[in-house]
Image (tube, helix red, strand yellow):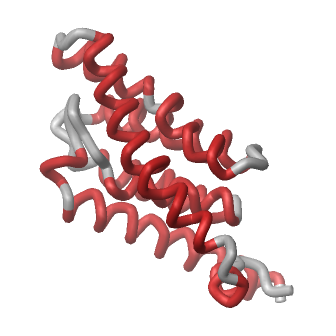
Amino acid sequence: MKRDRMIRRLIVTALTAAVYTALTLAFAPISFGSIQFRVAEILNLMAYMDPLYGAGVVLGCFLSNCFSQLGPIDMVIGTLGTALAVWAITRTKNLFIASLWPMFANTLVAFELTYIEHTPLWFNIVSIWIGEFVVVTCAGYPLFRTLLQNKKLLSLLQTERQ
């Protein structure tokens, strides 16, 4: 029983990471840089439904950032931003508030972009916030609000069997 649960957790993490990475790379032109709308960031809200999904989102972010033009620093800083967002989301009771965490947490990416690309910090903060807000809050919040009302789908997405 314990082994089955561990295998299931590994599968959920691997699949979530694969979907995050695939979405990021499929939309690569808008997934990286000062002005980005990383569609995969919508998956952050999976951690609101079940914290186990958070590990896959963070792993997917790391794998995606291996392809970033910013190099290894993005693998660390960009992934840290997503990890902080996921951590905050798992501790938030309100879905709308949870949808805002990626915007704030990924302010780290704005500092990273300013350091590497020598672009204005204010520009990077505003553009990162707009991208995260559009993807996670404007698109993700209504989607997940609807998903959370679908009991059948929720039961399929549960990572632990009752």
Whether 146 is drawn above or below 5: the answer is above
- Quadrant holding the N terminus: bottom right
In which quadrant will I find the C terminus? bottom right
Q: Residue at 57% x, 57% y: name it.
A: 45
Image quadrant where residue 154 sits? bottom right
Residue occupying the point 47% across, 75% down? 15
Q: Is residue 64 visible?
A: yes
x, y percent for residue 75: 36, 39
Q: Name the residue at 80% across, 86% down.
A: 161
The percent position of residue 131, horizontal first and vertical second, equals 33, 39
* Residue found at x 60% / y 56%: 54
Q: Position of residue 128 (x, y in %)?
A: 34, 31
Against 24, is 3 above or below? below
Specify whether 22 is left or right of 48. left
Residue 21, picture quadrant: bottom left
Relative to 71, 3 lies left or right = right
Please state if 46 lies on the left or on the right of 33 as rendered.
right
Instruction: Indicate the quadrant where residue 130 lies.
Output: top left
Where does the image place residue 114, in percent across and percent down from the top left? 26, 14
